[in-house]
Amino acid sequence: MNLFQMSLKNTSFKNKKLIITIILLTIGLSVFSVVKYISANLISMVEKEYKDIEDNNFIKVTTLQHRNIGGDEIEYILNMDDVENVVLDYNLALMLADENEKIIYQAKVQEYDESLGFSFVEDKIEDSINGIVLPDIFIKDSPNPTDFKQLMGKTVNFMLEIENEDGGVHIEPYPLEVIGIYETKLDQNTASLFVINSVLEDIQNLMQLGSNVYGFDVIINPDSNIDDVSSKIEQLGLDTVYRQKSLRSSLKNVDSQTKIIKIASYILMLLGIIVLLLFVMERVNKRTKEIAVLKVIGYSSLFASTSVFIELIFYMLFSSAFATVLFKMAVDIVIRMVRIIPLLAIRWFSFEMAEMFIRNATASVGICLVLYVCLYIRIRNINPLDQLKEVKGINI
């Protein structure tokens, strides 16, 4: 008897357990493949953004509560053996409002300098620099969500807390025309608004402020360990940001965001394996007399278990092919719906599709091999004499 013919004869997709198995394994494999593909693309994007990272020797230092940094703290950092220089960052944190004095958000304000070399979306710098330059960001976490690009040429206000003679304070708007929108990849928490020095001094005088330092750049020696220097600075209650730390944080975020979905896909595949095992054992139990006859006429337990194994391979390859198709469709949906994730489209019958099918098929065959051991043990324990005693017309 031909082993493959026997396996094909017994192959059927009508069993409910088998259908459930194929659905669970297909969804599990496709979800896992999509998450793996997305995470690989995100990691590649992050690593590309942070290329040549080991050469970085700059640490951005800020205060967690936006407090003024004391001169003794700056001097302590400057005197560290690993520190080459400290570049102070003078700025203010002011409430920004629109022309109707509706608060937008608390912004970091710094001095504008033409040497900054901004790439402008739109500007009127040549006409006048006595205004404000905004980043091309969208403030969404605000009672008044605002797209800064729509404010070009309009008036915005700094809402200043001015101290009264009696010791109280009142809010006074400080209007400025938006004369430039510059390009940036920073968000509302890190991007600065820029005004010329005379405006800064005027605001500081109105609010009776000095030139407060809220952050600075630390330049360390090339041979120093940037993590060790950062740790010493953070012991002062300051916050540090540098490229090596940002890379680790980005990779950790990618890992944590995909881990839950991967676990869900593992659970689906595990359920599929359990249902598949129940299906296989049910198939073996229904065919015990057939297997007993095969043993009596000279076929081994290995032959019988291999025939069921080949049948499983057919089912699992079908599941792998279907999972690969779902993977391609899911990637297309993610590309259309979630534009923030930079994915490359996958073509039908491409190398990527073939590679994904091979991965799915390899995982499926691995599952079948584990089940094959269970199959062999179960079939080996079938006693042909006990089974044939129950067959009508046979006396043993």
Image: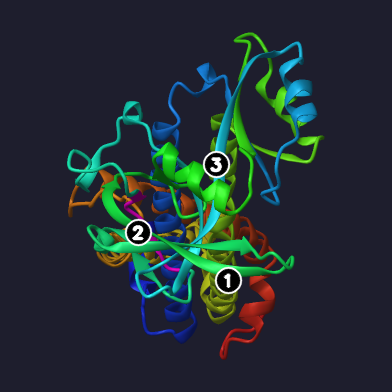
Question: How far apart are labels 3 and 1 at the CA level?
Answer: 87 Å
Q: In the image, residue 358 lies at what x, y percent?
A: 36, 47
Q: Residues within 10 Å of mark 3 (few under 14, many from 20)?
A: some
Given the image, on which type of amino acid does mark 1 rest?
Ala
Q: Is residue 277 above or below residue 132?
A: below
Image quadrant in which the C terminus is located: bottom right
Which residue is tagged 1?
292
Secondary structure found at label 1: helix
Query: Of 8 and 340, which appears nearest the observer?
Result: 340
Q: Disc number at residue 4?
A: 2
Given the image, on which type of amino acid does mark 3 rest?
Asn
Q: Which residues are magenta?
A: 133-140
Can residue 46 be seen here? The reply is yes
Question: How far apart are labels 2 and 1 at the CA level?
Answer: 19 Å
Along the horizontal axis of the image, is 3 left or right of 354? right
Q: In the image, residue 16 lies at what x, y percent?
A: 45, 86
Query: Of 77 and 377, which appears nearest the observer?
Result: 77
Residue at the image position 56 percent from the left and 89 percent from the top? 393
Given the image, on which type of amino acid does mark 2 rest?
Phe
Which residue is tagged 3?
91
Q: Residues within 10 Å of mark 2 (few under 14, many from 20)?
A: some
